[in-house]
Amino acid sequence: MARPPRANPPPTPPFQGGEKYHRNSSRCASASLALFVAGCTAGPNYHVPEGAVANAPAAAGPFVNSIEPAFASEALPDHWWRLYDDPRLDAYIQEALAANTDLRAADANLRRAAYAIREAQSARTVATTIEGQAEQTRLGGIDALDVAGSSYAVGGGLTYPLDLAGGIKRSIEAARADAQAVEATRDQVRVTVAASVARNYVGVCSANRSIAAAEHVVAVQRTTLNAITRLFRGGRDTAFDVTRAQAAVDQSLATIPTIVAQRQAGLYAIAALMGRPTANFPRELIDCPTPPEIRRPLPIGDGAALIRRRPDIRSAERSLAAATASIGVATAALYPQVSLGAAIGIAGPFTTIGTAESWGGNIGPSVSWSFPNQIAVRARISEAGAAAEAASARFDGAVLTALQGTETALSAYAREIEHDRALARARDSAAKAVDQANRLFTFGRTDLLSLLTVQSNLATAETALAASQATLADDQVNVFLQLGGGWEDQAPIPSTAPHLKGALKTLPQLSPNSSR
């Protein structure tokens, strides 16, 4: 290339299309002597784009909904589900994180990515070759009978690539960034598994609370039915009133089987998440009376912490780094590929085996260069630049999607708290109206239809409140899911690849000056 890099090069955008690299390549090619003397790394050095959404002050600041009393700006803890202070839930999540089948597949994908790093690194090592051959030749054509003689050749060689253009270095950078993207994807699976266990756990307990609410309504309506039945038997009421009271009881009873089915579905889902057969669902959870609650404002942090933490954002950023490194891999093909090699062997007619003249060898550099046919190479550089532009767009999209999803979840949770409180007041009013109507009916100051109407209002209020409380518990889990926590206490690369445990590096804080 033209000259060795300066000690502190200025920040360079990660990609600006293929033509930029063609011009840089021409300048490097015009001073090929410097390439052999000092060497340089082809392609751009990676930096998070200065104009990336992740660097926007509005993205890194407090959340819009952080002013709500339901939230606190303190950092999200690593194990957010422990805020529920429920040892059973904690045990279920830990079992799922150890045995979930999706996580097992993600761990295998991470091992594969780590081996890909090792494969890329192997291009820097000495390559060895051993060859041997023996042949017999005839003179005068294939059908001739007179034998000209037999010969042999046996030898071995060593080759070491100098990587003066940095193509191998860039391929290692790309492999490492790809592996870090896979690692972030594995973390996203952990986040999803933990949230899914918690969501189904609170769903099961919420279903039990809904069943209890429905049974309470049934009990109230049965009391009325029994009273109407006694009056009918005493000749003070009609069969029509008994039928209407029985219909109200049956209608309330009809809601319970559906809730029971929802509860069982949650139990089966928890079993699958924990890697258990469905028959081994956690039966001890069947009688869970109420879902766990966090009796404090939810810690949510800010946008900057979200961007650093969310695995899908980290995966998109690492994919951008890999795409940028791939530009360098393509650009390096413009330059001569220089290797140091050595070979030794023996060859000749069989009659010369062991003689001094049968031995031979060589040592020195070798150069290969596809200079006359660079159209395909330049096309690949442009392809890599376009791929990096697409990766940058996906990175920005991941940040925007994360911020949108988080704000939506925070807003939904805050509004559901208000909704729940209003429904609780409505339920209390309906219960008071039922008590008043019962007393009026007992003293003959109101009719049965009025009593059944207020009881129906109570049933509706109880059902709505139970549904709101279930939604509130689900929204709470969804907030933590959108915040993207729960992966931090991650296991190392499995022991089937112990020599690779240091191959993956953690992602530094995102900033325009974070370079590779």
Image: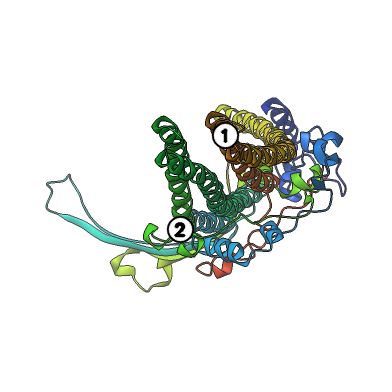
Residue tagged 1: 451
Residue 62 visible from this viewpoint: no
Q: Position of residue 315 (x, y in %)?
A: 64, 45
- Could you tell me the amino acid type at mark 1? Leu
Query: Residue at 64% of width from left, 57% of height from top?
Result: 292
Residue 437 visible from this viewpoint: yes
Query: Residue at 80% of width from left, 46% of height from top?
Result: 71
Residue tagged 2: 271
Please tell me in which quadrant of the rendered image residue 25 appears.
top right
- Dot 1, crowdedness within 10 Å: few (<14), some or many (≥20)? many
Classify 343 as above or below 59: below
Are the residues at dot 2 and dot 1 in contact (C-beta closer than 8 Å)?
no
Please tell me in which quadrant of the rendered image residue 501 appears.
bottom right
Which element carries disc 1, helix, strand or loop? helix
- Could you tell me the amino acid type at mark 2? Ala
Q: Position of residue 313 (x, y in %)?
A: 68, 42
